[in-house]
Image (tube, rainbow, N blue to C red):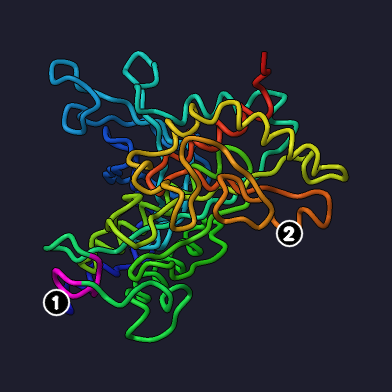
Amino acid sequence: MSLLTDLINLNLSDSTDKIIAEYIWIGGSGIDMRSKARTLPGPVTHPSQLPKWNYDGSSTGQAPGKDSEVTLCPQAIYKDPFRRGNNILVMCDCYTPAGEPIPTNKRYNAAKIFSHPDVADEEPWYGIEQEYTLLQKDINWPFRWPAGGFPGPQGPYYCSVGADKSFGRDIVDSHYKACLYAGINITGINAEVMPSQWEFQVGPEIGISAGDQLWIARYILERITEIAGVVLSFDPKPIQGDWNGAGAHTNYSTKSMRADGGYEVIKDAIDKLALRHNEHISSYGEGNERRFTGTHETADINTLSWGVANRGASIRVSRETEKNGKGYFEDRRPASNMDPYTVTSMIAETTLLWKPT
């Protein structure tokens, strides 16, 4: 095993200019991540320097067997914390050979929205709070929970310290440092209310970059849990009963919201979100109705509510924003398994482009 570790940690730059690029994309379920590697002749600094590639879409639920080729288009690159050196992770989106985005390519439409002049001029910032649950590999039960049983009730686990309260910190810290190494704008981590549930935050990032970075951060976490022999779950309500669910609260601001008088702009934006509430909820993740029940720090899924410092509302405005008369708001509706391209672009579209009739 020591030899295997030595080989995994080989520094390629000692013997070759070639690098390994791990091409990453989103599979047919909309939440599964796929990747494969290829050798490139030397280091690259921009995705435009990378060749397009392809894969068998019939094996990922994204193309029929009789016409299975799907094209990978590199969109963003990050340092590879696993292979290190000049090796890279490449976030791709997916197209037919004719150049049309496939149905699961949510990045394509998001990029169109973010490139609209009215959106680009407002420089939308996003900070995404990604919650997730660590599960035992063979029994599909939370990590370090007694098999078939439960730990003590919620209360001592949030931001906890101690072997009897904090489960999986080595995985979480490894992910934190790996994301910083990769160039992800990860701004923090914490243990969540349910034991074995954690959160990391990405942002603030402008526009499409928020989605790219969250997907790569998810990929890195999936790889780390693979190494640790632990299963990663983005299920919004992995354990039924008196346990908190998992969300992906999305913090949002525009240039106008961050400027003097921005509080009124925020309230106008929330009014627009209320008018399209059902449309947003339907696009905010699978199984969200199991989490968004009006209990466990959630609101009623059927109506949009908002309040200052209210974690039981659909939209939370911070005390600082209220005090300063400008700032941001937090959309607490997205589920942990949401697509960040969909959620971020939809918020921008509704608040900046949509005109109520």
Q: Nearer the viewer, mark 2 or mark 1?
A: 2
Amino acid, disc 1? Met
For disc 2, the neighbor class at 10 Å (few under 14, some 14 to 19, many from 20) is few
Residue at the spot 50% in from the left edge and 42% down from the top edge: 211
- State whether residue 135 is above or below residue 27: below
Give the overall secondary structure of the magenta segment: loop
114 lies left or right of 284: right
For disc 1, the neighbor class at 10 Å (few under 14, some 14 to 19, many from 20) is few
Residue at the spot 53% in from the left edge and 36% down from the top edge: 303
Q: Nearer the viewer, residue 186 or 315?
A: 315
Q: Secondary structure at mark 2?
A: helix
* Mark 2 or mark 1: whose residue is earlier in sequence: 1
176 lies left or right of 353: left
- Residue 118 in view in this figure: yes
For the C terminus, give its image quadrant. Answer: top right
Q: Which residues are magenta?
A: 142-149
Per the image, the residue denoted by label 2 is: 319
- Residue 6 in view in this figure: no
Amino acid, disc 2? Arg
Q: Picture coordinates of residue 158 (x, y %)?
A: 46, 72
Spatial separation of the CA atoms under disc 2 and disc 1: 53 Å
